Image (spheres, rainbow, N blue to C red):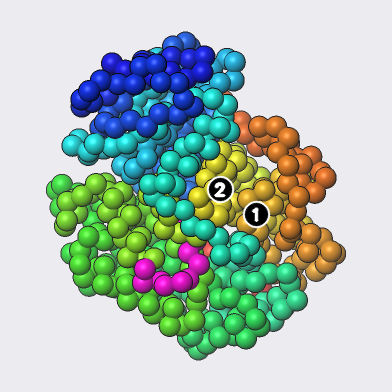
Amino acid sequence: MIILTFEGLQVECELSPSPRGGGLPGVSAASHTLTGSEIRLTLPRRAADYYRHGWQSWSLACWQPVDARVPVQKPAILQPLQTDPAHARVTGPGGSWVGAVRFEDGKVLLLGSLGTDASVELAGDVLRGWYEAPAAAGVWLVACGDETEVFEAYAAGLGDRLGRVAPAGPAPRVWCSWYSFYTAISEERLAGIIEDLRDWPIDTIQIDDGWQIDVGDWQPNEKFPSGMQELAGRIRDTGKRAGLWLAPFIVTDRSRLAREHPDWLLRDKRGNRVSAGFNWGRQLHAIDTTVPAARDWLQRLMETVREWGFDYLKLDFLYGGALPGMRQRAMPREAAYRDALKVTREAAGDAYIVTCGAPIVPSIGLCDAMRIGPDVADFWSSSRDEHLLSNPTTPGTRNAVRTTLHRLWLAPLVAVDPDVIYFPGRWNTLSAEERRMNHALAQICGFVATSDPPAWVEEAGVPSAAIRAAFGPASVRRAGPYTYEVDGTVIDFRQALGLPGPRHAGDRLLGAVLSWLGNRRFTLRILHTLNRRAAARRAD
Ligand code: 9PG
């Protein structure tokens, strides 16, 4: 047993395997670094709240009362793509790599791993951390103080071990095709937008999902007959950087890659392909990035998109590289992911890399920017997902704001991407107040992007001064835990924070029915078709 001494607080700490040569009794510091595959901290007094940290960009990060339960999110079929499937059924206080408790006096005790493949939970009065590989001797940081201080210490520790990516200049200002057209993009439609964006205060035009033959088959589909090189050239001719979306660690079951290289797919103990969730109306699988031929393919893919002329890459659905499974080269899953991201990063040369749907800690030091919350949407919150399916990770601006605010501590390590901002417009149901939060968060992050096409913004009568102002720079001052002053306006984010409370019997029943339906592939296929049609209608 070791006694960790912080100013005004002593914490009993057990490590396994226990360290040789005793501990650190009497050492007073704001943080301690300790080694062990498991660590147990006995809280000296009752804590009020727990900071839970979800696995990847879209997974929930928030403070919760210590005795609150966060219901299992539904439908289960989506869990591999929204949360760590290994933790999906944990409702108590717990999460990936880091956890913290807040005492009644506001003091925070944080426990965080300084390596990959680790988890933290609060069980009774014990804050416990463990590394997934039983033999791992992992490093932990224990910090105590005010919230900002302890997360700063954790970020500094992570940066020392995993690296920081120094920004090469101000964060890019981006137009991204996703949140206006979704997959209803074509070279013709984009050609008009690229022209319209000439005078906009942005520097990057990023083509999102919808250009490829399939997820896994990264060649242009029939809507891009002139090819991707031509499109990148068109963007670059307007003086802007060309960006492209890819999901390089996953495939759909119907992709050519999945059919031609079944041996590249991640499998479970029984030899079945691991589910990477369900999207685009298809079953998703993960690539086993430890297979040498798959790594070669990955390298070649990055080289190809660079040759096309894209030098801003949004790498999405990256969790696929870290799912549990039997890899050809046995190694902890997040270590395998980190390795694959390194290969990808190196092959992409000096491209600006934005990771998305990405396991957070294993991506540090290997990307320029990281999405730190779920997708925004042109609505605030979906009551179906929030109340009936208990799902805080699906697209919705409230979900995005909540999780992003709780991951701002990552800012010293990587550019933090809060997803796009919306201007007022025809399709948009965000209130002025909700839009203010959406815009302010982008200013706070210093990463501003939008998907609104100039024609829609013009139609809504947004003055060009407002567009310029939205893309910053802005003066930002933190006025309280969830209050910021942005360009002189006070923004109070507290209304975005709450989690849905206990559900009534009626909601539970309806939720069970929806969740059953949501787990049927045919329902998801129908939803996908409806969404695709709606996007196509809006785009015209
Ligand atoms: C393209 C999009 C955009 C977007 C990404 C990602 O089922 N889900 O929970 C789910 C969440 C996010 C998501 C898709 C599905 O969006 O974040 O910016 O690039 O992919 O398909």
| Amino acid at circle 2 | Ala
Q: Nearer the viewer, residue 203 or 196?
A: 203
Q: Is residue 495 left or right of residue 155?
A: right
| Amino acid at circle 1 | Gly
Which residue corresponds to the image point at 59% horizontal and 15% vertical from the top-left?
105
Q: How many other residues sit within 10 Å of disc 1, few (<14), some (14-19) or many (≥20)?
A: many
**Secondary structure found at label 1:** loop
**Secondary structure found at label 2:** loop
The residue that mark 2 highlights is: 411
Whether 349 is among the magenta residues is yes
The answer as to whether callout 1 falls within 8 Å of ligand 1 is: no
Q: Position of residue 431 (x, y in %)?
A: 76, 46
Which residue corresponds to the image point at 80% horizontal and 49% vertical from the top-left?
487
Instruction: Decide if residue 192 is in sight here.
Output: no
Rendering quarter of residue 118: top left
Q: Position of residue 150 (x, y in %)?
A: 51, 31
Q: CA distance from mark 2 to mark 1?
A: 9 Å
| Depicted 296 relative to depicted 80: above or below | below
Q: Position of residue 229 (x, y in %)?
A: 49, 85
| Depicted 348 relative to depicted 35: above or below | below
Q: Is residue 271 left or right of residue 57?
A: left
Q: Are marks 2 and 1 in contact (CB under 8 Å)?
A: yes
Which residue corresponds to the image point at 62% horizontal and 43% vertical from the top-left?
401
Please give the range of residues in magenta: 346-357
Query: Residue 299 has which mark?
Result: none
The residue that mark 1 highlights is: 446
Say whether disc 2 or disc 1 marks the residue closer to the N-terminus: 2
Rendering quarter of residue 87: top left
Whether 310 is among the magenta residues is no
